Image (cartoon, rainbow, N blue to C red):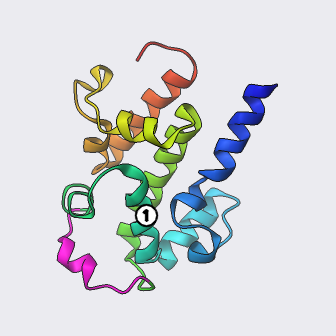
Amino acid sequence: MKVAAKKRKASATLSFINLLGGETIVNHPVRSEFDLISLSNEGISKASLDALTGHLGISKKAFSENILDTSVKTLERKKSTDKLDKRTSSHVIEIAKVVEHAFDVFEDENKVKVWLNTPNRALNDIKPIDLFYIPTGLGMVDDILGRIEHGVYS
């Protein structure tokens, strides 16, 4: 019973919405996958992107250039309230979903950062975060998290 309560507490504090800066920044209810599509179409704010990078243990420069394939200068010119385009918003949302899964599995922000930034044997000795630039890579990382969650050696 304690484990379930601890897991709920970790999920509540490090939820998908909180990873993107909380309800005041996202300002869009997310109750279904369709809400995520709507949020992507609307565009998330630069502040949401900044909030997410703060949880990853990676610099904004590395995140923008290696994962989003966008110049860090392009992002720096945007105000925190400026909306990102649909493609970038969708990509950041998918990353946030995988990171939320990592928080559910490890229940500790430092453990998540270390795991994301450490080469993983199950991922061909690639750091999980280095696969965030492509949807297939995000799926692979999410699969490994599911295996860890269910006690499968990964």
Q: For the residue carrying disc 1, how many other residues have a C-alpha within 10 Å: few (<14), some (14-19), or many (20+)? A: many
For residue 35: magenta?
Answer: no
**Magenta residue span:** 69-80
Please state which of residues 138 and 1 is positioned toward the viewer in this rendering.
1
Q: Residue at x 61, y 52 (%)?
A: 15
Residue wearing tag 1? 90
Q: How many marks?
A: 1
Please state which of residues 37 and 6 is positioned toward the viewer in this rendering.
6
149 versus 76 height, above or below: above
| SS for callout 1 | helix
> Which amino acid is tagged 1?
Ser
- Among the 4 quarters of the image, the one containing residue 17: bottom right
Q: Position of residue 38 (x, y in %)?
A: 57, 71
The quadrant the C terminus occupies is top left
Please state which of residues 107 and 65 is positioned toward the viewer in this rendering.
107
Q: Position of residue 124 (x, y in %)?
A: 23, 24
Q: Residue at x 32, y 47 (%)?
A: 132
- Left-right relation of 110 to 9: left
Q: Position of residue 14 (x, y in %)?
A: 59, 51
Outermost residue toward the front in this view? 110
Q: Residue at x 65, y 43 (%)?
A: 10
Q: Position of residue 70 (x, y in %)?
A: 21, 68
- Among the 4 quarters of the image, the one containing residue 47: bottom left
57 versus 47 height, above or below: above
128 versus 77 height, above or below: above
- Among the 4 quarters of the image, the one containing residue 90: bottom left
The quadrant the N terminus occupies is top right
Q: Residue at x 34, y 49 (%)?
A: 57
